[in-house]
Amino acid sequence: MSAYTYHLTCEYDGTFYHGWQRQPHCPTLQAAIEKAICSITNVKTVALTGAGRTDAGVHAAAQSAHFQLTKWMDPQRLLLGINAVLPQDISIKSMKLVDAAFHARYFAKQKTYCYFVYNGPIRSPLQRLTAWHLRAPLDIAKMRVAAKRLRGVHDFTSFTATQSDAQNHKVMLKTIRIVKKGEQIIFTLVASRFLRYMVRNIVGLLVEVGRGHRSATDITSILKAKDRQLAGPTAPPHGLCLMKVEY
């Protein structure tokens, strides 16, 4: 039986979800979108495959995913129908019919993540769910010097989850940029792939540098050690957002 493959891009607030991947007895983004697809298409089950698995509390401006149906449906009408039944914290931004061989994860060439820090003395109610609030001023110049040492091809074992099941920890970190806009600091990282917790662990260490607790010169020895315990704290999930997946 022939199948039609649909590629969608979705935006979501991950605050009230246990991450992307479907889990028993827990609300997840994959499960919520699959339920909406089934409701609109009248199929019993559908398998939605994402470009990556965002963790609990992490957001996305443009997560990419694909699914297959055995019957043709107009992509635009499908998009509108799914959005009509999705929770308000999830939205399908685009939908298109693609080649049957397309795979949202394996075809991805690079991903862009942003991590948001609100660096002001008084908390911001509007940013409480989307940025890590740090009251003490951070030294942007020192963090930028440290970030440069992370750019390029490295073994990022020290910056991945200790329970990571990835066999290869070498990653080409193409871009790592730190921009300050008023009281907001934005960390932008681009790579062909990311290890679990990699972005949050990198940000956690860079914040330690910005606080004056660590030195930029520590980066080289931390990378060489391949020891997660040496790389400092993990930044909280709510400041992280998947911005783009490119094919």
Image (cartoon, rainbow, N blue to C red):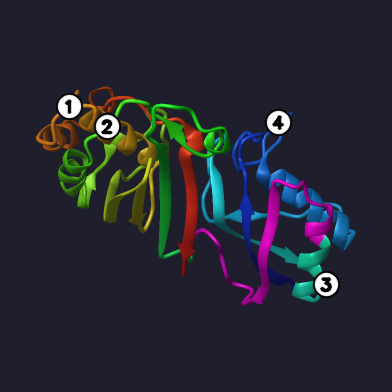
Foreground mark, 1 or 4, reads 1
Q: Which residue is mark 2?
A: 205
Three-letter amino acid code of the residue under disc 2:
Leu
Image vertical order of residue 5 relative to residue 21, above or below: below
Reply yes or no: does residue 95 show up in magenta. yes
Q: Which residue is mark 3?
A: 71
Does label 4 or label 2 sit earlier along the sequence? 4
State if disc 2 and disc 1 touch (CB < 8 Å). Answer: yes
Q: Which residue is mark 1?
A: 214
Q: Which mark is residue 26?
A: 4
Three-letter amino acid code of the residue under disc 4:
Cys
Q: Which residues are magenta?
A: 82-106
Reply yes or no: does residue 148 show up in magenta. no
Give the left or right position of residue 190, taking residue 226 as reference.
Answer: right
Does label 1 or label 2 sit earlier along the sequence? 2
- Callout 3 secondary element: loop
**Distance in Å between CA atoms under marks 1 and 2:** 8 Å
Does label 3 or label 2 sit earlier along the sequence? 3
Foreground mark, 4 or 2, reads 2
Does label 3 or label 1 sit earlier along the sequence? 3
Does label 4 or label 3 sit earlier along the sequence? 4
Report x, y in % for residue 20: 60, 43
